[in-house]
Amino acid sequence: MAAQLISTSEGQTMVLTLSNPEHRNALGPEMYAAGVEALNAAETNPDIRSVILTGEGSVFSAGGNLQRLQNNRQKPPEFQAQSIEGLHSWIEAIRTFPKPVIAAVEGPAAGAGFSLALACDLIVSAVNSVFVMAYSSIALSPDGGGSWSLSRLMPRQLATELLMCGERIGAERLHQMGIVNRLTEPGHALEQALQWAAQLNERAPNALSSVKELLAEADVSTLNAQLARERDHFVKNLHHANAGIGIAAFLNKEKPKYI
């Protein structure tokens, strides 16, 4: 069976499932294109307020398909470059998607699978999951924004160790570092992610979108520029209908129902 990305809905949450069980949910160009397409559709769908990315069965993703990579060595370099551009388009789509994206991780997340999880806004992981930047173990270097994410999330020396040595790191340690948000018992990552998504779905979508945009800009922003962006987002959201709903509900001790 070919690698595919299965899209389903749970209430106001879109669930995208990496499905390639014969190859431990290894990624491929079909998944990349389907991922971008799914996010584009969800962005304009008001009924979808969050997205969960998970893997089929007890594996998140083994990363790249090594047999496909071996075959690509016989083709012009531009062929592999085009494939990686597909992955990177998906990574960029996740980072710029205006709604929360949660990774629900069971089992291994290796190579580009690890990069994909790191691109998400939040990570829920089974306590026994293992993350590994396996690239250097087969004489390759990272893709999918792995080096970008790790260099921002952990000390340089640890990021170097993970990328150069291909060292495994457990979900518990990543949780201690604040990279994995929540730990669950094995087999319950998707369930926990769905519960969390349902809570996020009850919050004002415009406010969550502003939070995501502000965090993305903060990495490359001066304090003065970021203060100006915060001002602009605050004023825009204050004059959004949801602010009226939220403030009135708080004053009346009611539960808000945002549009």
Image (tube, rainbow, N blue to C red):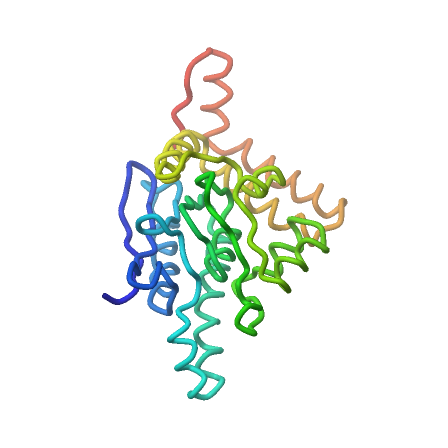
Residue 176 appears left or right of 48: right
Which of these two is toward me, 28 or 221? 28
Residue 164 figure quarter: bottom right
Q: Residue furthest left?
A: 1
Q: Position of residue 8 (x, y in %)?
A: 27, 47
Q: Residue furthest top?
A: 252
Q: Position of residue 54 (x, y in %)?
A: 37, 48
Give me the residue at 47% from left, 71% from top: 84
**Side (left or right) of 56 relative to 166:** left
Q: Is residue 237 left or right of residue 186?
A: right
Q: Is residue 137 above or below residue 118?
A: below
- In the image, 112 versus 235, the foreground residue is 112
Residue at left offset 60%, top offset 35% = 235
49 or 55: nearer the viewer = 55
Q: Judge from the rendering whether residue 217 lies leftward or rightward of residue 209; answer left or right.
A: right
Q: Quadrant of the N terminus?
A: bottom left
In the figure, 241 relative to 158: above or below?
A: above
**Measured from the top left, where is residue 135 in percent x and y?**
54, 67
Give x and y (percent) for residue 15: 33, 46
Quadrant of the rendered image containing residue 165: bottom right
| Depicted 53 relative to depicted 26: above or below | above
**Where the C terminus falls, by quadrant?**
top left
Q: Residue at x 58, y 70 (%)?
A: 141
Q: How many numbered circles does the render carry? A: 0
Relative to 59, does residue 3 appear above or below in the rendering? below
